[in-house]
C-alpha cells in the first residue's frame, strides 16, 4: 500500500479533525455518522480514512494497519504508546480527567484519614498512577462506560472520568473533587511508516501543525 491510511473515531474526534484535514487538502467523501462504511475515501485517491473505536486508534496505528491516527491523551496513556510517534497536540476534544464523588461524600476527609477508596474507571492505568502519587490506597474497578452510575449504586466511592461541561456529573448528583490532568487529542504516527512513507507523511504533519498554529 503506497497510500496513507488515517484512523479516526466517530463523534467529536471526527468532527474536530475534519477542519484540520481540510487545511491539509483532505476532504472525506462520506460522513461516518450517516454512512455505515468503515473505510471512507477522500478527495485525494492516496488518502483513506478508517473509522474505529476511540480506544482502538492507537492499536491500528501501532501495528501499521493505519499510518496515522487521532487519539485522546486519555486513550494514549492507557495504551502506553508503544510503536507510536506523537508529534503533535492537535488541541481538539479538550476536557479534563477528574475524580468525582457523590454529593455529600467527604473525599478530602477520607484522603486525610487514609481510608481505602473504591474507584471505578475506564482509565485504570492513569488512576493507579494518580492515587499512588498521592499515597491514597485504592481498589480500582474497571468499567467500560457510564462510570457516573457506580457511586450511585454503591459500586464505588469515587470515579475517574472525563469532564467537559460537568452536566453529566450534575445530572447524576456527582461533584468533581480533583483534577488529574487536562486532556486533548494528539496525532499519532506509526514509527515505521514515518520512515518508509516519509515523503507522503511529512507534508501532512507540516500542514496539520500549521493548521493548529504550531
Ligand atoms: P464511547 O463514547 O462510544 O464509549 P469513547 O468514550 O471512547 O467511546 P468518545 O466519547 O467519542 O469515545 O471520546 C473520544 C475522545 O474524546 C476521548 O478519548 C477523549 O479524549 C475525548 N473526550 C471524551 N469525552 C469528552 C468530553 N466530554 N469532552 C471533550 N472531549 C472528550
Ligand atoms: Mg464517550
Image: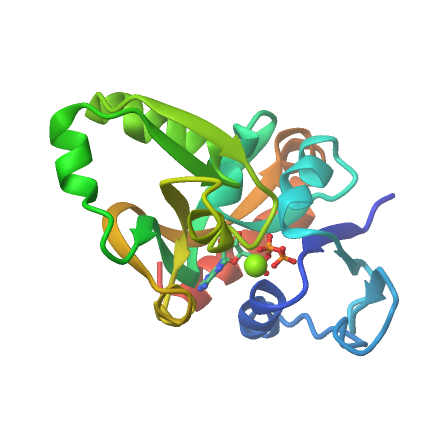
**As displayed, is residue 111 above or below residue 49?**
above
Is residue 85 toward the left or the right of residue 158 in the image? Answer: right
Residue drawn at point x = 27 percent, y = 55 percent: 176
The C terminus lies in quadrant:
bottom left
Give how far across and how far down residue 4 sits, in percent. 75, 51
**As displayed, is residue 167 above or below residue 58?**
below
Is residue 127 toward the left or the right of residue 69 in the image? Answer: left
Is residue 110 toward the left or the right of residue 13 in the image? Answer: left
Q: In front: 185, or 112?
A: 112
Q: Total of numbered circles in the picture?
A: 0
Is residue 183 toward the left or the right of residue 111 in the image? Answer: right
The N terminus lies in quadrant:
top right
**As displayed, is residue 191 above or below residue 6?**
above
Residue drawn at point x = 80 percent, y = 78 percent: 34
Colour mode?
Answer: rainbow
Give how far across and how far down residue 155 sits, in percent. 49, 40
**As displayed, is residue 84 above or below residue 122?**
above
Residue drawn at point x = 32 percent, y = 50 percent: 100
Give how far across and how far down residue 175 sits, in percent. 28, 58
Q: In front: 97, or 201?
A: 97
Q: In front: 125, or 108?
A: 108
Q: In front: 185, or 144?
A: 144
Amino acid at each position: 500500500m503506497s497510500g496513507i491510511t488515517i484512523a479516526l473515531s466517530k463523534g467529536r474526534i471526527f468532527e474536530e479533525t475534519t477542519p484540520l484535514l481540510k487545511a491539509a487538502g483532505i476532504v472525506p467523501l462520506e460522513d461516518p455518522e450517516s454512512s455505515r462504511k468503515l473505510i471512507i475515501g477522500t478527495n485525494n485517491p492516496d488518502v483513506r480514512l478508517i473509522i474505529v473505536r476511540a480506544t482502538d486508534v492507537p492499536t491500528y496505528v501501532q501495528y501499521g494497519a493505519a499510518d496515522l491516527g487521532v487519539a485522546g491523551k486519555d486513550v494514549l496513556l492507557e495504551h502506553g504508546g508503544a510503536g507510536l510517534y506523537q508529534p503533535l497536540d492537535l488541541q481538539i476534544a479538550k476536557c479534563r480527567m477528574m475524580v468525582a464523588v457523590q454529593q455529600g461524600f467527604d473525599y478530602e476527609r477520607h484522603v486525610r484519614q487514609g481510608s481505602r477508596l473504591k474507584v471505578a474507571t475506564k482509565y485504570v492505568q492513569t488512576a493507579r498512577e494518580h492515587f499512588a502519587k498521592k499515597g491514597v490506597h485504592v481498589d480500582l474497578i474497571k468499567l467500560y462506560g457510564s462510570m457516573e452510575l457506580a457511586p450511585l449504586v454503591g459500586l464505588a466511592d469515587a470515579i475517574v472520568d472525563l469532564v467537559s461541561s460537568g452536566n453529566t456529573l450534575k445530572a447524576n448528583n456527582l461533584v468533581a473533587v480533583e483534577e488529574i490532568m487536562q486532556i486533548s487529542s494528539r496525532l499519532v504516527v506509526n514509527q515505521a511508516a514515518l520512515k518508509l512513507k516519509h515523503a507522503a507523511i511529512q507534508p501532512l504533519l507540516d500542514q496539520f501543525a500549521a493548521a493548529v498554529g504550531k
